[in-house]
Image: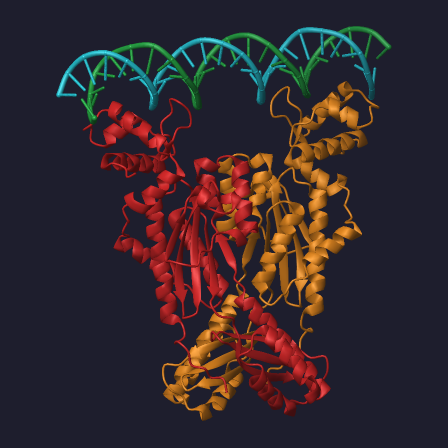
Chain colours: A red, B orange, C green, D cyan
DNA sequence: CTTTAGCACTCAGGGGAATTGAGTGCTAAC
DNA sequence: GTTAGCACTCAATTCCCCTGAGTGCTAAAG
């Protein structure tokens, strides 16, 4: 059954009041806030209905009303006015994103910190690839007889390199052969296929070359796996301590531990540009008393990033959602601009 | 004036009791803990003396005694029994250090987390170079006409690389010239010298080559500067919330903000293998009510790392110090083993 | 049928007084 | 120098009362 307009109006007032004050809100202040058109008694009748229908809760008789998760849900679905960010704010957000984007996880943690400081709640970020990464091209640069540099370009056009120490001396002349072998047989393959193929060529090449080859491949496998691992970075957990609902050090500690140690279970929805999870809608027990807002942004063609914010159920959904999508847009634009053009396989 | 042996014994008992319980300790429990040889009244007399001499403090008449910073100082200097780690523990520490050390800051944060979880206090880590980093060798790998890969080996033998998008097409034949130029003129130079030299060669080479050159150099400068920047990583700030002295959310928040936002002012002594700073001995105001234990370890020849632990003044100095030096040793060994041999300048 | 005014009732939170108990300082005896 | 005894202090705890915000209900007004 639908709520009357007035009930909705009241619910909205209650929620917004509660978001501000974190105190149960009473009939009188509601009446005042609604312009004094109706008396507090009327409001009380309406409130009783709203409690009955589960949109509000009462900590105890003779306390004001507090929104229930169901109430919040209705609020974010229908009542909440989508906030528009001011130009100044958008500007600030974009400024705070002017970061070097060399290391992916630097970006994550920096952007996370920025988000958190904008919304005053803890934030988390992650990037998930849509395809498995493969190597696109190899290069070996001799340094001396016992070491050389491996350079690997990955399918997302990022480049990794490292100095490789060799167990035994290798003839410089043989490097080109090896590079050809690498580029011929090991590009476009998933890490596990790589190890596979390494076995296959084992007998066809001289042992000392094979040693170098397998060192290179193991480096490649490691790097690819590391690069495609979904990493979750959290920031600003300390913001929790500012909130009255976490004045209790134990609760704060619990949630902080969850956010720093069990980040894997933070919500990472894979659809839609923005998702709001309210209290018990969260799967993780640790989040049952908190709400989470998650937005996604695009990186290139086949990667997707997520930014999430964790806060009390009474968090200011409208403003968090607005800022979060501001960041998501900013990031999408940032990556869209600087990132490599679509695809252009240079594989030979 | 020296303290009598008995006074020292009493001081030690008081401190160790207080470390355990965080409660002022009274004469009776001291008497009990000392084997009942003396009565609590005697202890009281001694305690009065110790207060007089500034080794102990009394929150108010009729509370037990609490160690003063001066008392802790004497304790760590003389009374504390240097704890030896059990073999099992050393083993555990070394295990927790079996990490990939590709990215320096990954190591830092991982080791920081490990330390923190071992001592149950927040930890921080940093690495400071003793020399400025320079480039040791350059390489350019063509990808297509509008992009190539820069590979740079730095003076500490780490290798950095990145894909470079070019504003205009470059003739492949010219790359070798460029590489020679890079290796001839820009190796061994500090980042600022590099920019300098770039100016000098400006007129001597064709413009489109110069464009590529300056892109490369700017990448090199950035990477070198980033790599030589001292970075401080903190971990486990949440541990603070477990401590009774930080039950107050405001205090906890203050210290956490300090540790995450103003890390630069965390103590980074540059001498000795281990340093203990007690309460007011810290320069930063934010640390006046906490103690800090810092140990250092060596990375290769010209880098030095620091691990620090922040805790309440009543922290368990003996065990923290022991574990910390366990970690320091572990890290020194780890780097000593895997790290590149001393020096071997391949600069041409 | 809805709204309002009036009134008795409930209950968390705050302030103050009383109580408790750990621990002290002092003194006098051993 | 050490100990027992005793009066004293003071934080912390408990209890109680009070206050006030806010409710639910009823009866009257619209």
Residue nearest the viewer, comparing B247 with B229:
B247
Quarter of the figure with residue B102: bottom right
Res B284 seen here: no
Q: Is residue B149 above or below residue A5?
A: below
Instruction: Pick the residue in front: D17 or A41.
Output: A41
Above or below residue B130? Residue A93 is above
- Residue B142 percent across, percent down from the top left: 47, 86
Tell me, yes or no, if residue B325 can be seen here. Answer: yes
Compare residues B311 and A174 and report the one nearer the observer: A174
Give x and y (percent) for residue A73: 36, 43
Quadrant of the snapshot with the N terminus of chain A? top left
| Whether residue A236 is situated above or below residue A299 in the rendered picture | above
Q: In the rendered view, would you say A270 is above or below B168?
A: above
Which residue sits at x=63%, y=49%?
A: B116
* Quarter-of-image position of residue B135: bottom right
Q: Quadrant of residue A172?
A: bottom right
Instruction: Please state if B95 lies on the left or on the right of A277 as rendered.
Output: right
Q: Position of residue D6 (x, y in %)?
A: 71, 6
Q: How many marks?
A: 0
Q: Position of residue A331 (x, y in %)?
A: 38, 62
């Amino acid at each position: 059954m639908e709520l009357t307009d007035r009930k909705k109006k009241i619910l909205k007032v209650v929620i917004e009041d509660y978001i501000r004050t974190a105190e149960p809100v009473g009939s009188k202040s509601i009446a005042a806030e609604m312009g004094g058109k109706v008396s507090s008694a009327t409001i009380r009748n309406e409130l009783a209905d709203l409690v009955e229908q589960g949109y509000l809760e009462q900590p105890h008789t003779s306390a004001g009303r507090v929104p229930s998760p169901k109430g919040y849900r209705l609020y974010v679905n229908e009542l909440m006015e989508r906030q528009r960010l001011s130009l100044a704010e958008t500007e600030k957000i974009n400024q705070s994103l002017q970061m070097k984007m060399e290391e992916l996880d630097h970006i994550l943690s920096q952007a996370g910190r920025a988000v958190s400081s904008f919304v005053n709640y803890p934030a988390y970020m992650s990037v998930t690839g849509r395809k498995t990464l493969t190597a696109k091209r190899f290069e070996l640069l001799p340094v001396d007889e016992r070491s050389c540099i491996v350079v690997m370009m990955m399918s997302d056009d990022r480049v990794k390199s490292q100095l490789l120490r060799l167990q035994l001396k290798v003839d410089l002349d043989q490097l080109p052969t090896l590079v050809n072998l690498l580029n011929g047989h090991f590009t476009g393959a998933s890490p596990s296929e790589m190890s596979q193929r390494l076995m296959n060529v084992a007998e066809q090449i001289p042992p000392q070359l094979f040693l170098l080859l397998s060192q290179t491949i193991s480096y490649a496998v490691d790097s690819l796996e590391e690069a495609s691992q979904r990493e979750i970075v959290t920031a600003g957990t300390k913001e929790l301590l500012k909130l009255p609902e976490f004045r209790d050090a134990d609760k704060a500690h619990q949630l902080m531990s969850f956010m720093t140690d069990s980040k894997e279970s933070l919500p990472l929805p894979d659809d839609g540009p923005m998702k709001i999870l309210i209290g018990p809608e969260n799967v993780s027990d640790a989040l049952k008393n908190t709400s989470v807002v998650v937005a996604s942004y695009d990186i290139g063609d086949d990667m997707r990033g997520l930014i999430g914010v964790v806060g009390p159920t009474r968090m200011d959904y409208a403003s968090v959602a607005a800022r979060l999508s501001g960041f998501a847009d900013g990031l999408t634009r940032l990556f869209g601009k600087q990132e490599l053009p679509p695809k252009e396989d240079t594989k030979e």
